[in-house]
Image (cartoon, rainbow, N blue to C red):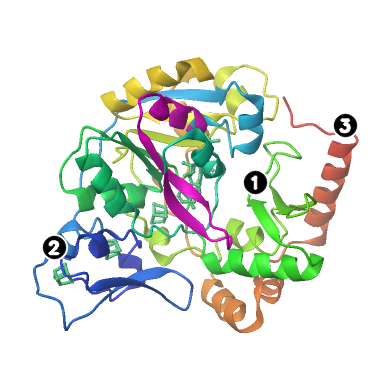
Amino acid sequence: MIKINNPIDCCGCTACKSICPKNCITMKIDREGFRYPIVDYDNCINCGLCERVCPIKNKTEGQDLGIAYAVRNIDSKVLESSAAGGTFTAISKAIFRINGLVAGVKYTESMEVKHFLANSMKEAEPFRGSKYVQSDLGSIFEEIKYQLDKGKVVCFSGTPCQISGIRGFLCNDYDNLICIDVVCKGVATPIILKKYIELNEKKYGKQIVNLSFRTKDYGYHMSTTKIEFENGDYILSSGEFNAMMGPFIQNLCLRPSCHECRFKSRKRQSDITIFDCWSYKKLTGKLDDDKGYTSVWIHSEKGKELFERMKNDIVFSELNLDEIIEADGNMVEKSISPHPNRDKYFDTLISQGLVKAAKKYAKMTLISKFKDLIKRRLYIMGIYRYNR
Ligand SMILES: Cc1cc2nc3c(=O)[nH]c(=O)nc-3n(C[C@H](O)[C@H](O)[C@H](O)COP(=O)(O)OP(=O)(O)OC[C@H]3O[C@@H](n4cnc5c(N)ncnc54)[C@H](O)[C@@H]3O)c2cc1C
Ligand code: SF4
Ligand code: SF4
Ligand code: SF4
């Protein structure tokens, strides 16, 4: 049966919990806020299934076709509310056109980040935008298996470890499953989101109904966080300096397994990988209007077919894969080192709260804060624009 001796050896994918025939594995949240499997030994029959499906214990070879594009959704509203070029919405639309289902990540009513299964574009809209804390997978693997067995086409999107997790859990290679992963630096503890919401609801005396980890109000290339309140008000803050995103950007609050990620590779478990296309101008020689493009990297015939189905909803330029990985794909193969103060950051986060932990360990110089402020002022005045 599964036993986690070192947190680095578990990415929290839930494959073991989902496969257990005796339902004797539960995902328990540890002091850092991440979920790990705990076995109820009294009910365990020692069948070994949990170990057989674990993607960390059983490494599988991925696939790749080496085809890459810079992609943008032609709908300006979709583009505005997506993290990069709005490709995931074009993918979802293509899936719904063939009567399929789409699994992605959205906020629950209590602003937790969780995977859901959608059967219409309306239901899939909240999947838009990267939420950088680890999502709660709940029972999504079991729900997807049920739909796949009924013959439904299902598109599952998530981090590379979540894709490996569902593939491990399913055991069989379903023709009607399509997997989309993101290039992933790592996931942050859900604690930072919870505390950030509490902090700002208390400060402004209003309920928060949406939060964008990366809004484009100051352009795609500037990291900006947006909080939206129930009465329609919103506030913006610099991602580099706010108490939630600052520690994430500085690698203070990632899951331990992200620092030795076993899922980073040029050969992927997914059919399509999506990631940021920061260097659009350099890669294509075309002007960049700072509204965002997605790098789309295709690994399988299924991925190729899906891309064909998306073509009415996007504009795209073909890219050289090596060039795009060199420019923007630093996290394709490399794991990020933990910040030297990671453990102290968590101690402070737990005992003294989000702001004190960020102030102590996610320090930024006054000069960089000042430069950021000036850049934003100049942006509002229409004087500063990203170098096109
Ligand atoms: C945790 C995380 C780390 C990332 N790290 C990098 C990176 O290091 N470098 C890089 O270039 N790009 C990274 N990305 C990808 C990038 O931020 C964009 O998501 C990607 O470029 C696609 O944007 P889009 O506009 O096409 O679609 P969007 O509509 O913005 O796509 C959103 C997609 O991300 C999924 N998603 C959102 N939050 C989560 C979550 N918490 N867990 C799993 N899936 C989620 C949604 O289900 C949906 O499929 C990361 C994304 C996530 C979620
Ligand atoms: S060995 Fe079998 S019964 Fe025991 S926890 Fe693993 S899957 Fe469940
Ligand atoms: S299957 Fe996933 S959740 Fe279970 S031990 Fe392995 S990595 Fe952790
Ligand atoms: S860095 Fe690796 S382990 Fe961490 S969330 Fe991404 S794919 Fe999973």
Residue at mark 1: C-beta within 8 A of ligand 1: yes
Residue at mark 2: C-beta within 8 A of ligand 2: yes
Residue 143: percent from the left, percent from the top? 30, 50
Q: Residue at x 80, y 65 (%)?
A: 204
| Figure check: 188 above or below 156 | below
Q: Give the mark toward the camera: 1 or 2.
A: 2
Question: Which mark, residue 382?
Answer: 3
Residue 339: percent from the left, percent from the top? 54, 66
The Cα–Cα distance between marks 1 and 2, rounded to whole angstroms, is 39 Å
What residue did someone put label 2 on? 49
Earlier in the chain: of badge 1 and badge 2, it is: 2
Q: Give the mark toward the camera: 2 or 3.
A: 2
Q: Give the mark toward the camera: 3 or 1.
A: 1
Ligand 3's quadrant is bottom left
For label 2, the SS is: helix
Q: Quadrant of residue 217?
A: top right
Q: Is residue 316 visible?
A: no
Question: Which mark, residue 214?
Answer: 1
| Figure check: 367 above or below 174 | below
Residue kind at label 2, given as amino acid type: Leu
Q: Is residue 177 magenta?
A: no
- Range drawn in magenta: 88-117
Q: Is residue 221 visible?
A: yes
Q: Is residue 105 magenta?
A: yes
Dots 3 and 1: beta carbons under 8 Å? no
